[in-house]
Image: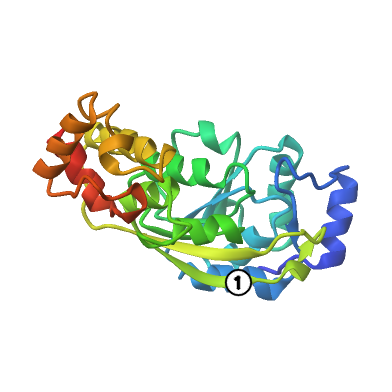
């Protein structure tokens, strides 16, 4: 039988059964609209042959939409009650037992994923969305693409180009791994409870080749952090602490890397930062 999806009434019943009160801390605004979860899965280009990791499956509405395609899912859930119930819900909705694996853990502490999934799909809360994404991209190089639903502010920053007002350290760090794009908007009305912020879908595709070694990445991120801690200052000032100790020394190193010392951090691409790190 085909996999069936959760409806709004069933989601509320599950929450009541588990004594789950949606909390802002865990970002538990559950999606209650089948068209929306299918939209996310479509944006992620999930097919029957894919192995998918889902972060924060909650009550399982998005999980079932992924499984509906024929893909297999590794679901990482921090709430013990939800992690325990998810396989039961999947079975009730005609999911074969071997297609879903649940990991009861904090996503920020997960260091291994069974089956090496190549697609990431998630509905992530504001307070952990960027750290979780960067942790997974750093830890699991076999992740090739994905789509996540996040608050609009977070998604727009991740996909922001250099020079824009919202371009920041998360934009540069995400770009280290590949390209990012806004992949759609999500109505507030598809959530229970209805949030007071807008949400978007943001997608990524990992670059075919790694941009550098782990040592190079750490040095690049150190320079990125320094640049954006003082984003209104010229690079020769903002980076003096990590490039030689003085503005003059920082200027010399920036010029050696082909970067104008009078620019500001928000004007540089990830390749500029990587070049500075490689030459310093």
Determine the image quadrant of residue 251.
Answer: top left
Residue most extreme to the left: 256
- The answer to whether any part of residue 41 appears in the image is yes
The quarter of the rendered structure image containing the N terminus is: bottom right
Residue 128 spot, x, y in % from top left: 58, 42
Number of residues whose C-alpha sits closer than 10 Å to that of mark 1, classed few (under 14), some (14–19) or many (20 or more): some
Residue 157 spot, x, y in % from top left: 49, 57
The quarter of the rendered structure image containing the C terminus is: top left
User: Foreground: 104 or 223?
Assistant: 223
**Number of marks in the rendered image:** 1
Residue most extreme to the top: 245
User: Foreground: 218 or 229?
Assistant: 229
Q: Is residue 155 left or right of residue 254?
A: right
Q: Is residue 19 left or right of residue 232?
A: right
* 189 lies above or below 83: below
Residue 256 spot, x, y in % from top left: 9, 42
Q: Residue at x 20, y 25 (%)?
A: 244
- The answer to whether any part of residue 210 appears in the image is no
Q: Is residue 118 left or right of residue 99?
A: left
Q: Secondary structure at mark 1?
A: strand
User: Foreground: 223 or 101?
Assistant: 223
Q: Residue at x 43, y 37 (%)?
A: 229
Determine the image quadrant of residue 186.
Answer: bottom right
* 58 lies above or below 160: above
How is colour applied across the structure in the image? rainbow
Q: Residue at x 58, y 63 (%)?
A: 67
User: Foreground: 77 or 200?
Assistant: 200
Residue 226 spot, x, y in % from top left: 36, 35
* 128 lies above or below 174: above
The residue that label 1 is drawn on is: 185
Q: Residue at x 25, y 38 (%)?
A: 236
Q: Is residue 265 left or right of residue 9?
A: left
């Amino acid at each position: 039988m085909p996999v069936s999806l959760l409806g709004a009434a069933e989601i509320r019943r599950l929450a009541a059964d588990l004594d789950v009160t949606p909390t802002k801390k865990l970002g538990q605004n559950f999606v209650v609209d089948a068209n929306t979860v299918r939209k996310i899965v479509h944006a992620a280009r999930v097919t029957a042959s894919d192995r998918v990791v889902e972060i924060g499956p909650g009550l399982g509405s998005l999980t079932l939409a992924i499984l509906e395609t024929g893909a297999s899912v590794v679901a990482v859930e921090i709430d013990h009650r939800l992690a325990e119930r998810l396989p039961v819900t999947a079975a009730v909705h005609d999911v074969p037992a071997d297609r879903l694996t649940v990991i009861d853990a904090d996503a920020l502490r997960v260091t291994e994923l069974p089956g090496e999934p190549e697609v990431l799909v998630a509905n992530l809360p504001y307070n952990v969305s960027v750290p979780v994404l960067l942790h997974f991209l750093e830890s699991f190089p076999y992740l090739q693409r994905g789509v996540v639903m996040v608050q609009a502010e977070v998604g727009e920053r991740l996909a922001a180009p250099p020079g824009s007002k919202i371009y920041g350290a998360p934009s540069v760090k995400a770009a280290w791994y590949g390209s990012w794009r806004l992949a759609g908007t999500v109505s507030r009305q598809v959530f229970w409870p209805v949030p007071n912020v807008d949400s978007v879908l943001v997608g990524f595709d990992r670059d075919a080749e790694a941009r550098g070694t782990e040592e190079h990445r750490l040095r690049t991120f150190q320079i990125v952090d320094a640049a954006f801690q003082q984003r209104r200052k010229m690079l020769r000032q903002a980076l003096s602490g990590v490039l030689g100790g003085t503005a003059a020394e920082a200027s010399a190193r920036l010029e050696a890397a082909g970067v104008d010392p009078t620019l500001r951090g928000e004007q540089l691409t990830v390749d500029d930062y990587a070049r500075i790190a490689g030459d310093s």
